[in-house]
Image (cartoon, rainbow, N blue to C red):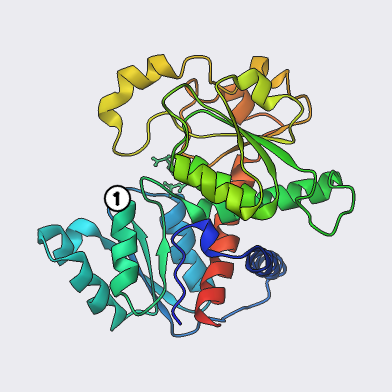
C-alpha cells in the first residue's frame, strides 16, 4: 500500500525511531564520504505554492545525493496555476515520478493529492502542519540529549526530555506537538490567547501518549526545560495580520531575559527567523542555538524519509 507522509502521526513510534536511525546513518555516510545511491533513477516531483529555502534545497540535494533526481514545479509554472484540478495533477504526476513533495496553503490540498496520487505524497508544509520539520527537529533533539547525556541512558532517547514552545500555535507548533506526543517528550505550549494549537491536534497528541500542557505564560512554560522552540509570529499567507499580531505577541519573544528561567535550555527555530520579533539576535546567534543543526538535519531526515517511503 502506498504510504503518504502528511503529518508526523502518520508514523508509529517504532517507525519514527527506524526513520531517525536511517537519517543518522545517512548523516554519517555523508560525513565519511561514503556514496549512498539508494534511490538511483528515482524522481521526486516538488510542487510548491509557497516560497522555500530549506525544504526546496534539502529535498533537491537529498535526491541528488541518493542518486536520483528532483523536478521543481512552482505552482504557477505548471497547469495547476491555470486551473487544472489538483486531482488531475496528482494522477498525471504519478505516471511520471516516484514521489511528490507538496508545499501548499490548505492542508486539504495535500490530502486531496494523496487521495488521487498512486505514489507517496510528502507534506512539505501546509497552513496546518510541517512534519518534515518535525522529523529534523526530533533528530536534532536526539543528538542534543545524546551529547549532554541528559536522558539518563534510557533506551528511549527522548525519555525525561522536556520542551517548551513559545509563540504562535502554527503549523510548525502543531506538528512539533504531535512529534513530542509520538516521541514521549514532555511539552508545554505558551501562546497568547486565541493563538493556541487546534483542539484536534491536542487530542491527537494525547492519543499518541503525551498531551502538551497549554498556557499563556511564557516564563512558566520555559522553566527548567531542555529545549525552547519558537517560530515566526506571521506565517506565509498571514501578512495582512501583521499589525494585530505584533501587538498580540508582545512578551512572547525568546530573549536572554526569558531564558533566565531556563538556564540549561537549548534554543530551536525552524527558520527563517525574524530577529527582534520572535527571537533576539543575541539568542539566535548565541551558544544555546541549535538552529543551523536543525536546518542541516532537514537534509538527512528527508533522505531517510524518502528512502523509507520508496524502498519499503
Ligand atoms: N523551515 C523551513 O521549512 O524553511 P523553508 O521555508 O526555507 O523551506
Ligand atoms: N510558520 C512558518 C514556517 C516557515 C517554514 C510559515 O508557515 O510561514
Q: Residue at x 16, y 66 (%)?
A: 85
Residue 263's spot in the image, x, y percent?
78, 24
Can residue 176 be seen? Answer: no
The quadrant holding residue 228 is top right
Residue closest to the eye, 296 or 195: 195
Q: How many marks?
A: 1
Residue 309 versus residue 85 in the image, above or below: below
Give whichever of 289, 86 is nearer the camera: 86
Q: Is residue 273 above or below residue 10?
A: above
Name the residue rendered at 33%, 48% in the picture.
51
Give the residue displayed 47% in from the left and 31% down from the top.
196
The quarter of the image holding the C terminus is bottom right
Residue 284 at x, y = what percent? 60, 30
Q: Residue 27: where, in percent of width, then height?
A: 67, 64
Residue 78, above or below 98: above
Element at badge 1?
loop
According to the picture, the residue beneath numbered tag 1 turns out to be 106
Which residue is pictured at 60% across the width and 44% down the height? 292
Amino acid at each position: 500500500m502506498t504510504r503518504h507522509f502528511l503529518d508526523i502521526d502518520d508514523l508509529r513510534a517504532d517507525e519514527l525511531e527506524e526513520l531517525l536511525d536511517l537519517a543518522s546513518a545517512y548523516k554519517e555516510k555523508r560525513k565519511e564520504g561514503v556514496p549512498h545511491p539508494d534511490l538511483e533513477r528515482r524522481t521526486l516531483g516538488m510542487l510548491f505554492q509557497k516560497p522555500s529555502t530549506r525544504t526546496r534545497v534539502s529535498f533537491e540535494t537529498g535526491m541528488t545525493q541518493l542518486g536520483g533526481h528532483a523536478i521543481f514545479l512552482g505552482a504557477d509554472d505548471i497547469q495547476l496555476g491555470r486551473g487544472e484540478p489538483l486531482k488531475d495533477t496528482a494522477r498525471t504526476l504519478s505516471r511520471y515520478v516516484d514521489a511528490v513533495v507538496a508545499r501548499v496553503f490548505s492542508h486539504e490540498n495535500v490530502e486531496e493529492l494523496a487521495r488521487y496520487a498512486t505514489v507517496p505524497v510528502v507534506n512539505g508544509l501546509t497552513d496546518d502542519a510541517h512534519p518534515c520539520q518535525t522529523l529534523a527537529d526530533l533528530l536534532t533533539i536526539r543528538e542534543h540529549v545524546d551529547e549532554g547525556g541528559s536522558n539518563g541512558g534510557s533506551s528511549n532517547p527522548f525519555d525525561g526530555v522536556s520542551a517548551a514552545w513559545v509563540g504562535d500555535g502554527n503549523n510548525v507548533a502543531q506538528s512539533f506537538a504531535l512529534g513530542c506526543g509520538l516521541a514521549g517528550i514532555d511539552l508545554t505550549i505558551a501562546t497568547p490567547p486565541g493563538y493556541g494549537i487546534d483542539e484536534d491536534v491536542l487530542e491527537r497528541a494525547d492519543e499518541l501518549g503525551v498531551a502538551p500542557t497549554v498556557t499563556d505564560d511564557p516564563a512558566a512554560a520555559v522553566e527548567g526545560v531542555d529545549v525552547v522552540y519558537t517560530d515566526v509570529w506571521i506565517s506565509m499567507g498571514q501578512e495582512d495580520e501583521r499589525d494585530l499580531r505584533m501587538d498580540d505577541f508582545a512578551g512572547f519573544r525568546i530573549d536572554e531575559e526569558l531564558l533566565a528561567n531556563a538556564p540549561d535550555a537549548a534554543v530551536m527555530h525552524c527558520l527563517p527567523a525574524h530577529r527582534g520579533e520572535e527571537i533576539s539576535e543575541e539568542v539566535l546567534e548565541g551558544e544555546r542555538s541549535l538552529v543551523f543543526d536543525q536546518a542541516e538535519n532537514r537534509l538527512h531526515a528527508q533522505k531517510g524519509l524518502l528512502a523509507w517511503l520508496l524502498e519499503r
